[in-house]
Image (cartoon, rainbow, N blue to C red):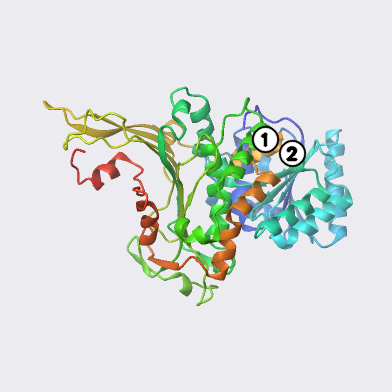
Amino acid sequence: MTHDRTTAPTSIVVFGGTGDLAKRKLFPAFFNLFIDEWMPKQFQILALGRKQYTQEGFRAYVLENLKEFSRNNNYTEEQWMSFSEKITFLNFDITDENSFLNLNDKLTAFDVACNKRTNRLFYLSVAPSFIDKVSVNLHKTGLASNIEKDRIIIEKPFGYDKASAIALNKLLNENFKEEQIYRIDHYLGKETVQNILAFRFANTVFEPLWSNRHIESVQITVAEQVGVEDRGGYYDHSGALRDMIQNHLLQILCMVAMDAPVEFESALIRDKKAEILKAVRRIKPEDINHYTVRAQYTEGVIKGDAKQGYRQEPGVDPNSNTETFVAMKFYIDNPRWQGVPFYMRTGKSMEQKKSSVVVNFKDVPNKTFVNGRNNPVPNQLTINIQPEMDIRLSFMAKKPGLDMTLNPVEMVFDYFECAPDSPEAYETLLIDALDGDSTLFMRSDQVEEAWDIIATIQEEWENGTYSPMHTYAAGSWGPAAADELLSRQGHRWLSTTVEELREETNGKTV
C-alpha cells in the first residue's frame, strides 16, 4: 500500500491467461501500471491457456480487450508495442508436467537475461477445482520455491464452507509458505475502502468518536442492479451469503471496526482484522430468523425494462432455494463495539448499483433544539464505494433566515473531483503483490474465521429450518422483511446523501 516504483525484475505468470478475468481485469491493470510507469523496468508476462494462439494473434487479442476494458485509452503506439513485447503466450495443460517443464525453461531464460534469479508472481486465475493441480505441480517442479521472491495469488472462492476452506489452506501450505500466498479480494483495492484506514487513524477528529459511546449503528450495503446474467449455473450453487457476505462485506466490516495497529505494517494490520472476525458474535440456530433475512428476486422492472425472476434465469433450477439477497445483523463482542448493531445487505437485481458504509451516530445528549419544529437528525458519516466514490458527513445547521430552524447539510470529499482517473482496484492489488505487500490480502486465519461466522447460517438455510425464503421484485430494495430487521430496534436503512434525506422528509426542515 505504501511503496515507490517496484524495481525487482519479475516474471508474471497468469494461469487462465485467456479467461474472462485476464481479459477484463488483469491485462488492463498491468498495461495501466506500465504506461503510468509503476511496473518493473524488466518484466515478462507469460499467459497460459489451452486455446491455440500465435504470439501475434494473442497480442492482438489483448489489444482488442484493452480498447474495451482499460480505464486509460490515452496511450501511444510506441507504449503498446513496448508492452506487447513483454507478453508471451504458452499453450498449457495444467495436468501435464511437461507444460510446467516448458514454463520452467521460459522462467530460467528470463533469469539468465537479467543475470539473476528474478521475482516470480503466479496468478492462479483458474477454477477452484484446478487449484490443487497447479499448486502441486508448481511445488513439484520447484518453480515457486524461493520464499522471498515467489508469490502466489489466489482468487475467491476460498472454499465452499469452513471445512473446504481449511482443506484449501492445508493444500496451499503443503506447497507454499503462508507468506507467499496472496488471497485477493478486489473490494479491498478500491480507493474508498482503503481510505477507511486513513480516515480513521490519521485524523484526531474521528477516531475518538469511533465506538459504542457515540455510534448508534453501522450499515454496509453492496447492491447490484444486474441479475445473475450468464452465471446462473455457478450462482445457483453459491448464493449471496457465500458469494458476498463471507468475503467482501466481512472484509469491509474489518476495515470499519478494527483497532489501530501500532504501526502501518502488513502483519499488524492483518492481526487486527483477524481479531475483529474472532470477536463477531456467532449466531445460534434458534436466532437465525431474528438476525438474518434471505430472499430471491422475482419479475420486475429495472430502468424501464422488464426483468425475469431468478428461477427463470438460464442455468438456474426452477425450484431453486438459493438466495439472491441477504440482510443480516451482527454484533462485535469487544469493548469498543459492544451493543452496536452492524447491519449488512447485499443483493442482485436491486434498484440501484450502490456500495456504501453508513455510520449512524447517536442523538445529541441535550434537548436544546427539541421543540417539535427543530428535531435534529443524528449525524451520519457515509463512505460511498461505488459507483460514487466519496465521503460525506451530514450535520445540522441553521437554515438561512430570520428564525432558528435547522436543516441537514453535509461536507463532501469526492474522489472523482480530485482524481478522475484513479487506479482500478486490481492495479492497486497487483502492484502490492509485485512489491510483496500483503496488507490488503486475506490471511488463512481470516478466511477460516469468516467462514466460521456464517457456518451455522449456511447449515440451517440448507435445512430450511429457521429462515423462510422471502421474495422481492427486481428493481426494488429487497423484501419488507429486510426493513423489519432494522425497525425492530427502531432503525431503518439510511440514505447516503443529504438530498435523499431531504426527499424522505418531503423537503421540510427537520
**Disc 2 on helix, strand or loop?**
strand
**Residue drawn where x is 32% and y is 35% of the image:** 363
Indicate which disc residue 229 carries. none
Circle 1/circle 2 CB separation < 8 Å: yes
Residue 283 seen: yes
Amino acid type at mark 1: Met
Residue 86 located left or right of residue 366 = right
Disc 2 designates what residue? 43
**Residue drawn where x is 47% and y is 61% of the image:** 289
Amino acid type at mark 2: Phe
Residue sticking out furthest to the front: 286
Residue sticking out furthest to the bottom: 318
Image quadrant in which you'd find residue 394: top left
Residue 91 seen: no
338 relative to 319, above or below: above
Residue sticking out furthest to the top: 204
Q: How many marks?
A: 2
Q: Mark 2 Cα within 10 Å, few/some/many (few <14, many 20+)? A: many
Quadrant of the image containing the C terminus: top left
Question: Where is residue 60 shown, x and y percent of the image?
Answer: 64, 53
Question: Where is residue 1 shown, x and y percent of the image?
Answer: 62, 32
42 relative to 295, above or below: above
Image quadrant in which you'd find residue 420: top left
**Disc 1 on helix, strand or loop?**
loop
Disc 1 designates what residue? 39
Q: Mark 1 Cα within 10 Å, few/some/many (few <14, many 20+)? A: many
**Residue drawn where x is 48% and y is 65% of the image:** 467
Q: CA distance from mark 1 to mark 2?
A: 8 Å
Image quadrant in which you'd find residue 232: bottom right
Question: Where is residue 83 shown, x and y percent of the image?
Answer: 67, 41
